[in-house]
Image (cartoon, rainbow, N blue to C red):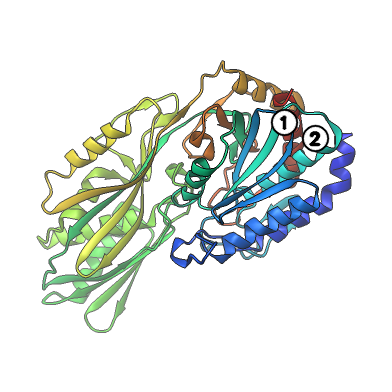
Amino acid sequence: MISKFLDENRNTILNTICELIKIPSISLESEALPGMPFGKNCSDALEYVLNLANSLGFKTKNIDGYCGYVEFGDGEELLGIIGHLDVVPAGDGWTKCAPFKPIIEDNKLYGRGAIDDKGPVIASLYAMKYVMDTMNVHKRVRLILGLNEEVSWKCIEYYKEHEELPTIGFSPDADFPCIYAEKGFLNAFVESNYLPNEDIKINSIICDNAINIVPKYAEAIVEISNISLDEIEVELNKLIVDSNFHIDITKIDNNKIKLVSNGVAAHSAFPDLGVNALSRLLITLNKLLKLHNINIPILEFLDSKINTDLNGKLLNINCNDESGDLTLNIGNIKFENNCFRVGLNIRIPVTIYISIIKQKLNDSILDFTDLTVKFEDEKPALFVPKTDYLVTTLCNIFNEVTGLDEKPITCAGATYARAFKNVVSFGCNMPGNMDMCHQADEYINVKDLFTSIEIFIKAIRKLTE
């Protein structure tokens, strides 16, 4: 029965995901409109899914433009499936297609949001459709649709203030077989004033990057006075070669040099999968300035405290547990009005309190003049015992469908599972697959997509018995 349903709806499901990907639903609070707190594109994505769900026979609700839900079933208890429709910015480096012009090639559906999280949301919706039409359930089943997950979670906080909370559930926004622990995370911003030196002056630094993505590109322009431009070029070339960085330098005008740093984008939860263009640029600038006895405290701080070989691991905090190491991503920089503001995204093992990391970071700047740290967003870790009913049930269902024997895992990413009690993250990335979240040429494997729908069908059926 399930295989027949999947065969009959195969093209519809794939076309639906493609149409949803075509909506560039980057959450932009700066473009808020009445009833659209995260901009028109996010609103359009929500309305697209709600209208589709209505046509499939579900009950739906738009919750003041912040989020929405799709529901069926009866009963006092509520099974929640929590996903999101917003995506990270397109980024560059795409080779298979334009980010919002999806294609299907070699059994892969490419496009921004294919795996994070539009593909999994539609997989969940059609799993719900099958259960609604063929089975009796003893709980209500609700697919909750967020619009601000990639930014500040204001959508899910609004939902929690105004709507019923799930009694049990999962978030299809990570990996199979089931994630029982997610690291905490903290966004910190290191700030400092800049006093230009007349010999080497920084005119600009540009890296307008999402803080939860390893920067692929960063550039700077420095102005040289009283020193030979050729001498500076030679020094820079040596620094770049010695560090094995990919930074291009170009002379502009008669007294300026432009540096362009190239890296590899990755989700900041896994900084070792990327190459941080911004950290390498800032460290190179600092080493150049030190050759000429010029000290910029914030650059010295980043140079001395960040190990670029590990793409952003904090050297002054040595802690890890079963959820993994503590990691840090230098995500972006603002340099204007002679002021630096560098954004750091820190992923924290489940056994470490966020307050400890804050104190450690505050302590780490004490040796540097005129540095301040501001904390703007944090999420506590998620931990559900591996022996918990929800974890064991979901793992067993995954192994039953796939024929594998996988054990529950931990994750450095942050999903909506941690926003509720008795909820874990579950799918859609398969064991052993590269995590394409936030990366160029993001895709979901089509075979895995339909396997995920079967897994979700059986999970919904089991959890609503």
Q: Is 370 on the left or on the right of 104, as rendered? A: left
Kindly identify the residue that appears in the image at 46 percent across and 36 percent down: 412
Identify which amino acid the numbered label 1 is placed on: Ile
- Residue 239 drawn above or below residue 76: below
Identify which amino acid the numbered label 2 is placed on: Val
Image x and y of residue 28, in percent = 48, 62
Q: Quadrant of the N terminus?
A: top right
Rendering quarter of residue 94: bottom right
Rendering quarter of residue 355: top left
In front: 184, or 417? 417
Q: Is 110 on the left or on the right of 244, as rendered? A: right
The residue carrying mark 1 is 460
Question: What crowding class fits label 2: few (fewer than 14 Cα within 10 Å), some (14-19), or many (20 or more)?
Answer: many
Q: Which mark is residue 21?
A: none
Task: Tell me whether circle 1 and circle 2 mark residues in contact (CB < 8 Å).
Answer: yes
- Which badge, 1 or 2, is on the more N-terminal residue? 2
- Residue 394 drawn above or below residue 195: above
Rendering quarter of residue 97: bottom right
Q: Secondary structure at mark 1?
A: helix
The residue carrying mark 2 is 131
Kindly identify the residue that appears in the image at 30 percent across and 77 percent down: 251
Residue at the far bottom: name it: 253
Q: Quadrant of the C terminus?
A: top right
Q: Secondary structure at mark 2?
A: helix
Q: Is residue 403 visible?
A: no
Kindly identify the residue that appears in the image at 37 percent across and 25 percent down: 351
